[in-house]
Amino acid sequence: MDAKKHISNISSSPTLDMKILLDNLIKDGKTIYNFGIGQSPFPIPESMVFQLSVSSHFNSYVSSQGLYQLRSQIADFYQKYTITTICPNQIIIGPGSKELLHLVQMVFDYDIIIPNPSWVSYIPQAKINSNNVLLLETTMENNWKISPFELEKILQNTNSKKMLILNSPNNPTGQVYTEYELINISRVLRKYNALVLSDEIYSEFCFTQHYSIYKYYPENTIICSGISKFLSAGGWRLGFLIFPTELNDYKDLVINIASETYGSVSHPIQLATIVGFDTKVISPYTHLCTKILIEISNYIYQVLIDNNIMVKKSMGAFYLFPNFNSKIKSIHLLHQYNSLHHTDISFCQWVFTKLLQETGIGVLPGTAFGRPSNELSCRISFVDFDGTLLSNIGKTQIINRNIIEYCPKITQGINKLIQWWL
Amino acid sequence: MDAKKHISNISSSPTLDMKILLDNLIKDGKTIYNFGIGQSPFPIPESMVFQLSVSSHFNSYVSSQGLYQLRSQIADFYQKYTITTICPNQIIIGPGSKELLHLVQMVFDYDIIIPNPSWVSYIPQAKINSNNVLLLETTMENNWKISPFELEKILQNTNSKKMLILNSPNNPTGQVYTEYELINISRVLRKYNALVLSDEIYSEFCFTQHYSIYKYYPENTIICSGISKFLSAGGWRLGFLIFPTELNDYKDLVINIASETYGSVSHPIQLATIVGFDTKVISPYTHLCTKILIEISNYIYQVLIDNNIMVKKSMGAFYLFPNFNSKIKSIHLLHQYNSLHHTDISFCQWVFTKLLQETGIGVLPGTAFGRPSNELSCRISFVDFDGTLLSNIGKTQIINRNIIEYCPKITQGINKLIQWWL
């Protein structure tokens, strides 16, 4: 193949692969406990769906930056997380936050500081864009948070300009940075004039209080978010960036690149999303969804803890990131793995593939997020329940009942998981 | 700015800029004759619009390659242009053909042969992807077609692998390659094992018969097309690529890059597009639209020719590409331009900006498509008419009447244009 060298080894996104794998197993009639994919289980807010259906005849090319009314609505909505005023002109609408994170990496001639573990696509995007990656290790003991001290050690090397990617609420760990932590990180970043790309795609599915680092470090923070998670519209493909006015030239460059690549986001989709950011729509919706997610998350957390599995309580998003190395079975599994002399699959991947084959439980192995091959961590995505049912129940009356009874796949799957590790 | 050097001078797409400029002039109450933008004036087929409205609740992430049923429908539809069978697995669905042309340029480590004039985005995309550009000059005398002889001269330099971008029906010239011409081009390409990226976005708006070079050179042809033009859904953002099985590894790489960038195309949009490629929908629709476009195109052509303006008859798409250098006024304009000592704007751009200011007639100057600054060529896009009205008239009865009477902006604009050049 005469493909460009720096991209020739880009493989398919593990999360999308997992989705296809599990969908195929389900099609084959297998019983699957789908803890593998990070897709919202809830239906899109009804008023957004209605708006898309009545906007379906719109066919004009629109501005690459995005419809003004949508940018204006998002600016108003996001205002609660900042002190400085956000103007519509600071915002870019794109076909998914993933594409926008990619474009930001494309324009900046910066090294990218990526915490480990992190979402699966930051590193491949750095490769596609020939950006150097600097990994910033985190540990479960520190709640998978980056340490300002370790961050400073990386920033002290001034051979290159640097951009930190910070994701809170976090995929895959479910952890959330506190105001205090963000202030401390901002201090270090400011000292070295480093940028931060703040991936806040789960902001409205935060179980505590979401804070944006933009509040403390506006001059060098680019926010990235979208409607895939907290408005449950992953399949619609719409994300947004918020640039500080200080980085206006870069914002314009991203818009120019957009105008030469994807052009703009689908016109009907933009019109429908305007409705979604109306606080009368989004606030009760995310409030209810979050309430449900908290209950399910706490249930799984308690079962894991009760069975001596190391895990941190989830504070947002759909995820728990347990580690099974302490289970006796892991030693037997390691012997078995070693005796098979695998070279194409890591211990971690092998274990969780075996789990899937033997139980139908699909999780993403920690290695997909950058964890070491001998660490038996995995991401549990707790969305295998009927979100339509649960949001209807919530709307009518019984939100205060035990909603776990409506999540048979969650309870059965987690209990099967525990049994397997015994 | 610390932007990456090779992209820091990418400016906004001239076609999108023109759209914004003209939209703003219209908003200001100016009378505009919009010959500047290449957007279909027709409404999207009703059954597609209906399907989008009933698919608006679909919110799942879908395969980066695109929905199987859509790829299957496109494969069946495109079969008429090829001899070898097209399989759904050879097809990739993307958010607009522009993004897909970009991704093809991204993966191949090839020099790109671009005819001059050409569509405005091929060269910026080559820059974004660090591909070397080799311009292949064409002339009005040769109907703006590339010459196999000149092509061979470029291919004889074997220092690099090469990919030709061929666009028929052509933007901006409105010309269409014949079967005979494509066979001759194929022979040269095959001799040097060069690739061709065949941009066939106007295939169904061909006034004669559309041929794809894929038919004669399948092993090294990648077809790019989409629904923006002949299904009038530019604002929906959906395009497709057809790879030959011989280039399967590259196809997989494009899909992998897609999975790490835009992810997939909007799910509801894909579902609605399936309906559009049903031959019972697309065939009568494009037949009627083409009939209308031919009449309008011929009207403008005749007026230009009658007034001694050099132009080739349009054979497809929405475009005519006249040259006004033979008009006496061009000499006066050149004197005026020289006396102003402009350094920031070419003669060609200056003339057509003046035309817009004095008459409200918006065209894209030839320089936007790569023409020399002293050549007074421009692209006339003949879509400033009420496509909804005309397609309704067509459907009922009076398609054989003089449809020009329903296009007041076209007739007034062209006559104003002639007057201005006197």
Image (cartoon, coloured by chain):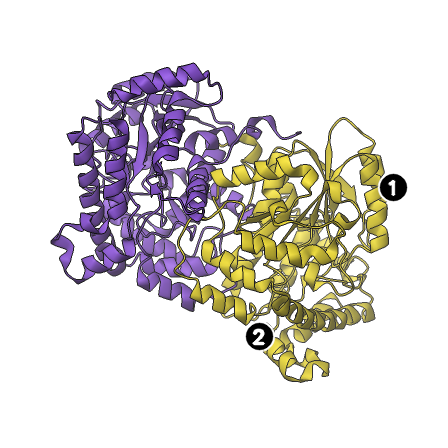
Chain colours: A yellow, B purple
Q: Residues within 10 Å of mark 2 (few under 14, many from 20)?
A: few
Image position, residue A324 (x, y; %): 77, 59
Residue A141 in view of the camera: no
Disc 1 element: helix
Image position, residue B372 (x, y; %): 36, 20
Q: Is residue B400 left or right of residue B107?
A: left
Is B177 drawn above or below residue A16 in the view shown? above
Looking at the picture, tell me which residue is in the foreground, B66 or A82.
A82
Is A79 drawn above or below residue B82 in the view shown? below
Image position, residue A68 (x, y; %): 54, 51
Looking at the picture, tell me which residue is in the foreground, A297 or A285.
A285
Query: In 3D space, how far apart are the residues under numbered discs 2 and 1 (Cα atoms)?
Result: 45 Å
Disc 2 element: helix
Q: Which amino acid type is shown beneath numbered disc 2?
A: Thr
Q: Which amino acid type is shown beneath numbered disc 1?
A: Phe
Q: Are marks 2 and 1 on the same chain?
A: yes
Which quadrant would residue A81 be assigned to in this image? bottom right
Circle 2 sits on which residue? A388
Q: Earlier in the sequence, mark 2 or mark 1?
A: 1
Residue B90 in view of the camera: yes
Quarter of the figure that contains the C terminus of chain A: bottom right
Residue lying at 27% horizontally and 27% vertically, measured from the top left: B421
Image position, residue A4 (x, y; %): 52, 31
Q: Is residue A175 left or right of residue B355?
A: right
Q: Is residue B12 left or right of residue B283?
A: right
| Res A149 label | 1
Residue lying at 48% horizontally and 66% vertically, measured from the top left: A51
Which quadrant would residue A316 be assigned to in this image? bottom right
Q: What chain does mark 1 sit on? A: A
Q: What chain does mark 2 sit on? A: A
